[in-house]
Image (cartoon, grey):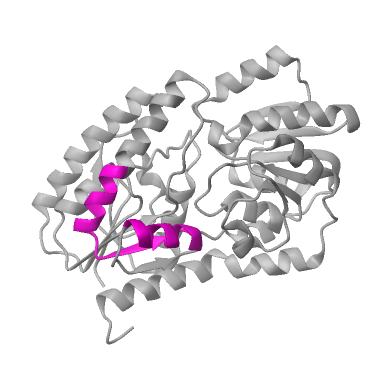
Amino acid sequence: MRLLLILNGSLASQTASIGGGDLVMHKFIRLSGLQPDILVPASAESFVQTRGRRFLTASNLQPTVLGILVAYAIRMVQGVGWSLRNRHSHDIVLAASPFGVDLIPLWFWQAPHKGAVVFHVLPERKAVSFSTRLRFGLAALEQRVMLKIMRRACDFIVAGNDTARRQLEVLLPGKPISVLDAGFDAGAMDREPAPKKDANLACFVGRLTSQKGIFDLLEVMMSLARTHPDLRLAMVGTGPERDLLLAEIQKRGVTSISLLGFIGERDKIELLKRSTYFFFPSYEEGWGIALAEALYGECRCICYGLPHYRAIFGDFPSYARLGDPADFVRAFTTCPPVTPAQKDFLRRYDDKIIATRLKQYLLGIACPTSA
């Protein structure tokens, strides 16, 4: 099977964390053994482990709304250029996201089978600043346009969870839609030693954006300071609202929250294994890679109850009502101890299992008689 993966929207670099959707595709490239060709920005090329051809586009610009838009516009043009110069050379072309920077080149590329990965359908979002309102508005507009392009360009869709699949069946009637769990690297976590749990340490891992619930965490920690004064929250990650969060922390005089920024994979695993709690009040997730890692790291996990979580993670996290910091505190106070069943349950989402599942699905599309 001659496969091209379009990762043209990747914002990954050696100095920034890699997004969840990108991470799933990079792990698939490494573990599938297919050696696909790849369309990817030069700034993310070092993450790619394939002997296939590499069609490189512009590196990241400044991580502002304007910088991202300019970089994406340049990459779209370059991606279309690569598609016009490389015709009839692939069995499948797969866009790693439903964004224009990936879908526009997909539309122009010629192949008998074309598809896109849609980890989740964007919900309505509440903005906390003008730049956030602008970013959310542009994302909603782009989603409407890209759905129209998917109807015309894609033969199949890969959804990130069953809730997204049901939504896409309405938005893209008649398209075959499969579900792909994102998964996580259980082997990497097993290789790292397990430090003693710190009873007063909670952590968060994710992009510092309002849709991850980072401002809700501020409310949660202020409330818990009255009943659990020794509890500390270590927040891993960076993002467009990091400075706004820091300003709010300083304004309210909260000393129990530490912003660690981007840290390496081994340091992240060590933190998860050392933390007793994992706080994850995200308003939207394609799947929940960080939550899976925390559950496997034997954290007591508290999260907002997103529609697809229970089908994936069962009753192992403690769920709070979406958008309700007070109920998040309630879930924290009633969160039960971790049992061995939690880690055993999560093993079903190991990366090797997920990569094999996607490989078999794509082989079934490209070579239905031999799959």
Q: Is residue 49 above or below residue 13?
A: below
Does 306 sit left or right of 79 as displayed? right
Taking the view exactly as shown, the residue that stands out farthest to the top is 251
Residue 50, by quadrant, is: bottom left
Q: Looking at the image, can residue 61 be seen? A: no
The main secondary structure of the magenta stretch is: helix
Q: Write the residue at 85% across / 44% down.
A: 333
Q: Write the residue at 61% across / 35% down.
A: 213
Q: Looking at the image, can residue 51 be seen? A: yes
How many numbered discs sit on the rendered protein? 0
Image quadrant where one finds the N terminus: bottom left
Measured as percent of width and height from the top left, residue 206 is found at 58, 40
Q: Nearer the viewer, residue 95 or 17?
A: 95
* In magenta segment, residue 154: yes
Measured as percent of width and height from the top left, residue 265 is found at 59, 46
Q: Write the residue at 65% across / 41% down.
A: 281
Measured as percent of width and height from the top left, residue 153 is found at 20, 57
Does 194 sit left or right of 243 as displayed? right
Image quadrant where one finds the C terminus: bottom left
* In magenta segment, residue 344: no
Taking the view exactly as shown, the residue that stands out farthest to the bottom is 369
Taking the view exactly as shown, the residue that stands out farthest to the front is 170
Q: Nearer the viewer, residue 353 or 242?
A: 242
Q: Nearer the viewer, residue 59 or 331?
A: 331
Residue 192, by quadrant, is: bottom right
Q: Is residue 303 above or below residue 53?
A: above
Q: Write the residue at 12% across / 55% down.
A: 86
Per the rendered image, the range of residues in magenta is 144-171
Measured as percent of width and height from the top left, residue 39 is found at 26, 50
Does 165 sit left or right of 153 as displayed? right
